[in-house]
Image: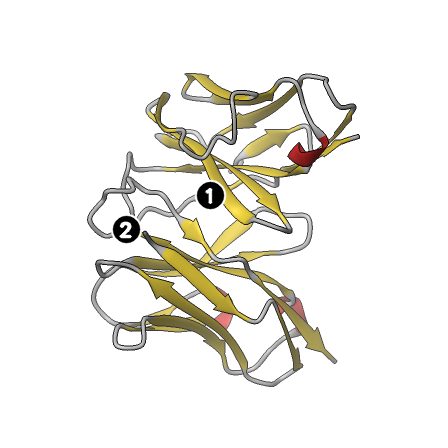
Amino acid sequence: DAGVIQSPRHEVTEMGQEVTLRCKPISGHNSLFWYRQTMMRGLELLIYFNNNVPIDDSGMPEDRFSAKMPNASFSTLKIQPSEPRDSAVYFCASSLLQGAVTDTQYFGPGTRLTVL
Amino acid sequence: AQSVTQLGSHVSVSEGALVLLRCNYSSSVPPYLFWYVQYPNQGLQLLLKYTTGATLVKGINGFEAEFKKSETSFHLTKPSAHMSDAAEYFCAVSDRDGGSQGNLIFGKGTKLSVKP
């Protein structure tokens, strides 16, 4: 039973480059979440989708960040242009029930992004 | 606004000793409460959650937590630590009235070390 799949697992890029992170949620899950984890700020919610529709993107730090979910089995988080302060581990998570506050979120292994 | 405070960024115990990880929350309404565990280089995994009913919640791997409304606390305990418990633990809160639509607010995490 595959869990949440994220790619790449590690990404090293130079400042100014475009970065695209990918996520495949668990099949049948209706909600998808993107988080960022840093030592300074901990784990922060960036954006989440219900049934492929973005519901809350208030956590997206600035216009350089964008996220899409073109279908139920795929989502991307794009940073353009990237900056060194974007270096972090980015997690994708999915849950079964749309907007259910009690539902368990299942996390992927994360993408460790380093921007030089 | 909701918030979560985890007391102690690092906790060290001996194998076989009691594990106590502290979590206090701030919420205008009784919240839903969660503990997640993160093993090195992995995503977060749900340990347990409190939604309603019994205030003492049992989770996986022998962990349990008790919701104490009067103390606004949800401390995580395990009677006897095992080496495999070494990980980072995150407390999280979600809004009971559904306003956050499934958003989790995470604490900064507590890294647990277990000494042989």
User: Residue A47: where, in percent of width, then height?
Assistant: 43, 31
Report in which chain the residue with disc 1 lies.
Answer: A
Report in which chain the residue with disc 2 lies.
Answer: B
User: Residue B66: where, in percent of width, then height?
Assistant: 35, 74
- Quick check: do tags 1 and 2 share a chain? no
Mark 1 and mark 2 in contact? Answer it, CB < 8 Å: no
- Quarter placement of the C terminus of chain B: bottom right
* Residue lying furthest top: A70
Quick check: A114 left or right of A33? right
As drawn, the label of residue A106 is 1
User: Could you say whether the residue bearing mark 1 is in a helix, strand or loop?
Assistant: strand
User: Could you say whether the residue bearing mark 2 is in a helix, strand or loop?
Assistant: loop
A70 is higher (above) or lower (below) than B62 = above
Quick check: A1 left or right of B95? right
User: Residue A4: where, in percent of width, then height?
Assistant: 52, 35
Tell me the residue at 55%/60% (across/down). Answer: B109
Residues at marks 1 and 2, CA–CA distance in whole angstroms: 19 Å
Tell me the residue at 23%/52% (across/down). Answer: B96
Mark 2, other Cα within 10 Å: few <14 / some 14–19 / many ≥20: many
Q: Tell me the mark number nearer the camera, choosing from 1 and 2.
A: 2
Amino acid type of the residue tagged 1 in the rendering? Tyr
B12 is higher (above) or lower (below) than A14 = below
Amino acid type of the residue tagged 2 in the rendering? Asp
Tell me the residue at 42%/66% (across/down). Answer: B59
Tell me the residue at 78%/23% (across/down). Answer: A14
Quarter where residue A64 is shown: top right
Q: Which residue is mark 2?
A: B95
